[in-house]
Image (spheres, coloured by chain):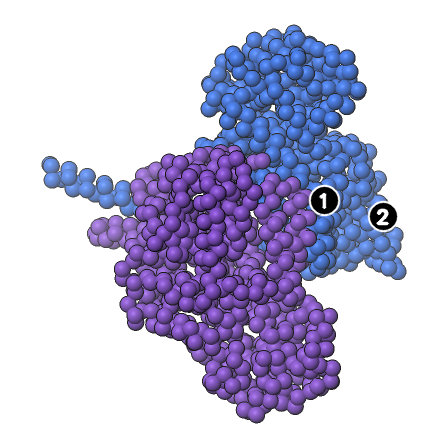
Amino acid sequence: MYYQVENVKLLDRYTNRKPANGTLYLTATHLIYVDASAEVRKETWILHHHIASVEKLPLTTSGCPLLIRCKNFRVAHLVIGHERDCHEVYTSLLKLSQPVKPEELYAFSYNPKMPKDSREIGWKLIDLKVDYQRMGIPNDFWEITDANKDYEVCNTYPPEVVVPKAANKATVLGSAKFRSRGRIPVLSYLYKENNAAICRCSQPLSGFSARCLEDEQMLQAIRQANPGSPFMYVVDTRPKLNAMANRAAGKGYENEDNYDNIHFKFIGIENIHVMRSSLQKLLEVCETKSPSMSDFLTGLENSGWLRHIKAVMDAGVFLAKAVKEEKASVLVHCSDGWDRTAQVCSLASLLLDPFYRTFKGLMVLIEKEWIVMGHKFSHRCGHLDGDLKEVSPVFTQFTECVWQLMQQFPCAFEFNERFLLEIHDHVYSCQFGNFLGSCYREREALKIFEKTHSLWPFLLQKKQEFRNPLYKGFTVYKELKPNTLPFSFQFWCGMYNRFDKGMHPKQCVLDHLLNCMSQKMKLEDNATDLENKLPFLDNPLPNEVCSLSKIVNASVESSKTPMLNTPQDYESEPPALLTNGAIVEEVDIMPDQDQKNKENFANHHDLLDLNSTMEVIESDAKKEKPQHQ
Amino acid sequence: MEFAELIKTPRADNVILHRPFYPAVEGTLCLTGHHLILSSRRQDNAEELWLLHSNIDSIEKRFVGSLGTIIIKCKDLRIIQLDIPGMEECLNIASSIEALSTLDSVTLMYPFFYRPMFEVVEDGWHSFLPEREFELLSSVTNEWRLSYVNKEFSVCPSYPPAVTVPKSIDDEALRRVATFRHGGRFPVLSYYHKKNGMVMMRSSQPLTGTNGRRCKEDSALINATLRAGKRGYIIDTRSLNVAQQARAKGGGFEQEVQYPQWRRIHKSVERYNILQESLIKLVEACNDQSHNMDRWLSKLEASNWLTHVKEILTAACLAGQCIDREGASVLVHGTEGTDSTLQITSLAQIILDPRCRTIRGFEALVEREWLQAGHPFRLRCAQSAYSNSKQKWESPVFFLFLDCVWQILRQFPCSFEFNEHFLIMLFEHAYASQFGTFLGNNESERCKLKLSQKTMSLWSWVNQPEELRKFKNPLFEANSLVIWPSVAPQSLQLWEGVFLRWNRSSKFLDEAYEEMNNIIEYNKELQAKVNALRRQLAELETDDGMQENS
């Protein structure tokens, strides 16, 4: 079923080039715009779930403008010939972009035609127990408990959590009563080298004077699980004022006098509402047409966005430093312990442990600190029609922090920027089950493991395009100590102006290097082949530079990166109309697929390309055109 | 004058040196006529400091008891600190440094004393002669000639002896035009666009004054570059307002009535000490160690440096667009035609002409459009970001040009034969150097100083293969296209390699560059190996074939 409107223009907000003229289609899942005027067919696909807002602008001579803002920061400015059509599209999009019931989400209808057991194996790709094992847990001090198996302790925690061995059931239950929503202190990361741990929880229900013996015992157990340190940090990631205000509501923060040997500290990260409005301001700056440098920098400053990013980064750095250098355990919380706490704990882990800077590691980290621990993706991302005040770019900020680190440490991450963008897209796309709902319990109730697919195996299949060619491997960098002076933070054009292609470097170093990597495989194969054809050569082959370097393998020559501001088809073959990429019949998504890929890089083009984004395939066949204003 | 007179304390022991990225080191400080040298007694010499006095922008001294501290701020933006025991020694050294770093006479500068430790294969003083450039031009067009009207520097003191002008305009006419243009800078050829035969010329402002003086040879000269029925563009780097005000002082702009075939566009580019202040503010912001993000962004904004980068690039793109897209010839000028004019003409060439994106071509561009074109380097680069002299003539015009090139390089990382280090090297040498290239304000001054005989050219050193290797961009793939940079604020960045160079370690970025280089180099080696194997195989097959045949 689809709805179709002819004579629709798509304006490019960055350049003044003549708007495209084409056809708009609405399917059950996508808005698709097909540019009829381009020499090469150009399609723009927008997932309904990605649409954040639809706005009807005042009528113009050329038609009815419709402004579509997306959660991945695409802004599509359509002009539709007839008012009636425009209204029709408008109301349809409003409905389609704001599903009411979870069952309407794309993940429940998305069908990549994959055998059932592959899907099940896909869900088992990330096993948190393996990660705990990696940290050496269970051990003398920590154990995995199923105390929460019936969600008696906390209904937003998973059934199994890691707590100090010394904390018995009574301590756990007692502490749960004293913590907001029962979110007791549990282990987030154990730094094996010195036994210092990062733990997380929600705020205590301390009010002005309340205390709880079990909670105090719980903290003591955490501190004593790290015998090397006489104290532990308790970090409240909120601004002090906010935490104090919470006391009036019977919540608050730990009183240093009531807990043995804790160092209490506030780190002022602002709440979800401040972050939401900060992003709003940032996007307004990004959307400004032809801003002056001053407008842009002032707008960037006034949005406060980079200040918030720095605050999160500073907190992560503080945690990592406490653990690594002071050998002290840290307990982190904010209010509920599912937003700022998730950001800060996952960032600290990333700084401390090179594993989390690999493909698999980042997946584990997101699974462990975000999905399983009850970051409310459904609310924060506005998956369903609901309270807009619950929406906040908490995960986006984490993604950006990782990106900022990648700028400072270009060789320390196995993946590249595109991997982050892909994950970010899917957090909003609802195409996979991973980010549905707001906690483990909800996901169980939604039966996502039975009814939907997991994102991770799909990402691993596209590993070759997401890899960082400069990655130096697991062992080269241990902990990262980023510079956090303000000038170390850059505006992330690739995220917030991602679809304004004209703003990006016209030649992409990443593409160039990825090409090099695949050429390398081909050349190595060539060399081996040739060596085999010369069996009677006894001597090792000379490595001297050959004067005939002009004789280049044709396939090598053709894979060179063309330049983007020339009239060339930059993307591969445009897809047939209304295919959404999910046309693959059989996919082998064994967990060891990535291993195979690694061994057989040269064949990666032959791998089934699961076009999991359902996103745009834009054949950027624009006229070479100067793009200064 | 003897340097010894200026050096009251030639050496001091137990001096502690603090500088970016190294632990403090103790050693002996020596002052020579041109260098400040600190040597620790370490075997590996790794801790030695050799600093050219001419690199010193400003110094500050302070005392705690008898321990003196001198803070030296360099033109390359580095800040170092020397702790010198003994108040007298410290004062002596400070006053010597002050005197030696601000020598009045050019002939006392280090380039006149420097003896190269390398063999000169190619003398850079002769690498980029106007005759050579003209030969290249003659191979594609015969509409131009090389005029020696300025042989004695008498027509235009800031022009070189040889300039390229339309063939149809004789020297007599050039002399007349020179009297009609500020400082005698009559319109000359800056760039010939092979693709469509359009040209870019540059000059200074016409001296129309308030009563609208005119000069028919002037319009004849620039009209000679137009094709029949075609219009040209005059890009005036001043705002209309400023250009109008210039008339009161005898300057002015081309009036439509007198230049009906030209369309004038005013594209304001900032000049003089406003740029210097901008640089001072930017560097101050970069050196601020405060953790306050708002403060950083507001200082960055208030410095206006990136605003200047954006406006210069925009004007250069406009010039390029007129030539390549509109198929029109262009004349660029501001007031004197020695600053913003050169920024625009040289950047437009980088956009339009692939040759300017090679090392050799870029050197030729700097030589042609900056040195020979009479950008007053000595005046402009006398002081850098730590200057407090606030002289109107000090201005980071060339520095901004390099920043703009870096911005284009960042947007087209595969289109340049050189890398960022090459640009940084030029920035350093423009301000302080052992070479004579950037001495003097124009060719006339350089001639009088006999620089080509008495000093070494920077190009003689740079163009040695082992030096060049450091400046080569591994990503370079020759690309014959016009490259249009984006000038959106989101596309322009702070040039970290220069401005943050001493404020944050570049270890991890250097490692990334190294890694990138390795990847590309390895592929090249592999390719060579495969080629060698193919050739061997082919030879063997031919041999076999011959054997079979025989």
Q: Amino acid at mark 2?
A: Asn
Q: Which hue belongs to chain A?
A: purple
Front in this rendered view, residue A587 or A195: A587
* Same chain, labels 2 and 1: yes
Mark 1 packing: few (<14 Cα in 10 Å), some, or many (20+)?
many
In terms of image quadrants, where is residue B374? top right
User: At x 46% / y 41%, what residue is drawn?
Assistant: A82
The blue-coloured chain is labelled B
The residue tagged 1 is B303
Chain name for mark 2: B
Mark in the foreground, 2 or 1: 1
Residue A191 percent location from the top left of the image = 55, 76
Q: Are marks 2 and 1 in contact (CB under 8 Å)?
A: no
Res B92 label: 2
Residue B333, x across and y down, in percent? 66, 24
Which of the labelled discs sits on residue B429, or is there none?
none
Does any portion of residue B110 appear in the rendered image? no
| Side (left or right) of A350 relative to A207 | left
Give the structural element (helix, strand or loop) at label 1.
Answer: helix
